[in-house]
Amino acid sequence: MNRLSHDPSSDFQRRLDRRAFLARAAGTAAAVAVASTLRANPLHALGLVAPRTAVRSGGAVGADFELNEVTLDALAEGLASGRWSSRSLVEAYLARIERVDRGERGVNSILELNPDALTIADALDAERRARGPRSALHGVPILVKDNIGTADRMHTTAGSLALADSIAPRDAFVVEKLRAAGCIILGKANMSEWANARGRDAVGGWSARGGLTRNPYALDRSTSGSSSGAAAAVAANLVAAALGTETMGSIMSPASLCGVVGLKPTVGLVSRSGVIPVSYTQDSVGPMTRTVRDAALLLSAIAGPDERDEVTKEARGKVAEDYTRFLDRDGLRGARIGVARNLFGESLMADRVIEEALTQMRAAGAVLVEDATIDTVEAIWPFDAEVLSFELKAALNEYLASLGPSAPVKSLADVIEFNERHRDRELGWFGQETFLYAQQKGPLTSPEYQESLRLVRELARTRGIDATIERHRLDAIVAPTQSPAWLIDMLVGDNTVPLSFVAPAAAGYPSLSVPAGNVAGLPVGMLFMGPAWSEGTLLKLAYAFEQRTQARRPPQFMPSIDLDL
């Protein structure tokens, strides 16, 4: 989500004021009718989605798609047995993408496809025949978010027109790791432009370069962001797995809304080198999959130190070679899990789903500790917004300078100026207030930055998650990840800023969202969080929960949902 603002405490009031202004501005009967239509379903009025009576084809929902809900293990087994080749997998996914993702009524989750995917697949097939597979992921197509660098014929743009022609000078470290494992980078997933770090009232899943990503469960509903395309593509079975990135909720939120598993690792476990940044202290690259086991497999492939990312030095001795070894169907038995009641309340419907999920956890033998509140969570954001503003300017300037003298933009100031010059295409739906605020900030040696960072770490770590874990002797803390997906509103932007993922994101600690149930066909996720380097524990608990509840349901690509409950 990466919601930055120079006045974060007033975000909710600003949205309410804007809605009131729009209502007052609708003075004529015709204007009132248009405003009402936009509030009820803005995509109908904008011609971006089919009328409610439209029905998707059976092929779209997966009835005739052989790879529907396939796991990474099943792909490995099928490739080993000869049931599939890497080429046939790529061809099947490309056909699925053409049918489900493209067109005015498609999900629109994939910004760019790899023009060399079939050639790479053929080479990997030949290598398998000659020498065997490199790993369990050999020949498996993977998507990566459009802020993750690939030094090939695809672009790396963070969804911005300012970088529309930019080719990364070198693969991101995580891409190097995937290629070394034999993965095929199938394409770049659309995302919230600049990882939702450009301005207020942003629309999750929208970028000037890629347009709007739609939720495959209901096409008029939000995917949230900023790893919108990665979550939607995995949910829609356009690929088995993808890599997203998170600064503040950008994996957790779309994973919850799109009914997939999202894992944000401890900052330092997975390298960020070659990734278009927001924050030095909070950015993380993580798996987005349909199962917890697949998330563990993908994390195993990408975790580890990288000399190009200093913070990964902290991971030495803390990286598991194989995260699937933590998975245990009986992993909830005897586990002490804190229920962060102060992170409930955003959505009555989501809370109901999570209450039922807690009942399931008790039945599986978990010891639930009620009111394991993170007392400092509401105090974190104002200081964290300052930290992220300082770091956004410094990190983006460093990244853009690394693109070389031919880069179209070389600094945050250049990006701001580009957006102004192309206002009709870049700033049509929301502005760049956050960029402008960050541009005013000084260096990271500034006392204001240093004090804000100290306070964030104290509030999120020492007096936050660490204190709660130690006080109640917990293995993990749980809460609802997010409300069910809200209607896309291009006039007002996203209308929710939940607290559930603020503490782990600000702390740089791991969090994991797993499907917990559904409301009117829309997914709701359960968020697991823990202290630094606790990925193994979170995967164990989430896997046991997933195996017991089997809560994920494939999307039906409905134009809208039926609210006749």
Image: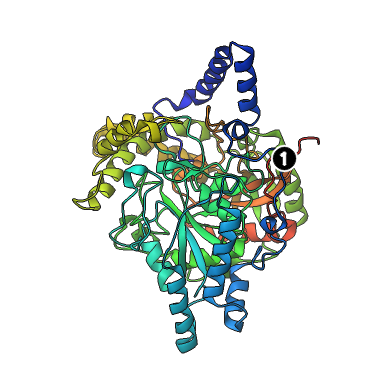
Please tell me which residue is depicted at 60% across the width and 57% down the height of the picture: 99
Q: Position of residue 290 (x, y in %)?
A: 62, 59
Question: Which residue is most to the right?
Answer: 565
Quadrant of residue 319 within the rendered picture: bottom left
Question: Which residue is most to the left?
Answer: 405
Q: Position of residue 367 (x, y in %)?
A: 70, 52
Element under disc 1: loop
Is residue 475 something that shows in the picture? no
**Closer-to-camera residue (229/41):** 41
Is residue 216 something that shows in the picture? yes
Give the residue at mark 1: 561
Q: What is the crowding at mark 1: few (fewer than 14 residues within 10 Å), some, or many (at least 20)?
A: some
Residue 281 as seen in the image, left or right of residue 323: left
Residue 465 as seen in the image, left or right of residue 236: left
**Closer-to-camera residue (335/244):** 244
Name the image colouring: rainbow
Q: Position of residue 384 (x, y in %)?
A: 41, 35
The C terminus: image quadrant: top right
Please tell me which residue is depicted at 43% across the width and 68% down the height of the picture: 178
Is 298 placed above or below 452 here? below
**Closer-to-camera residue (145/3):** 145
The mark total stands at: 1
Question: Which residue is most to the bottom?
Answer: 130
Q: Position of residue 241 (x, y in %)?
A: 54, 61
The type of residue carrying mark 1 is Ile
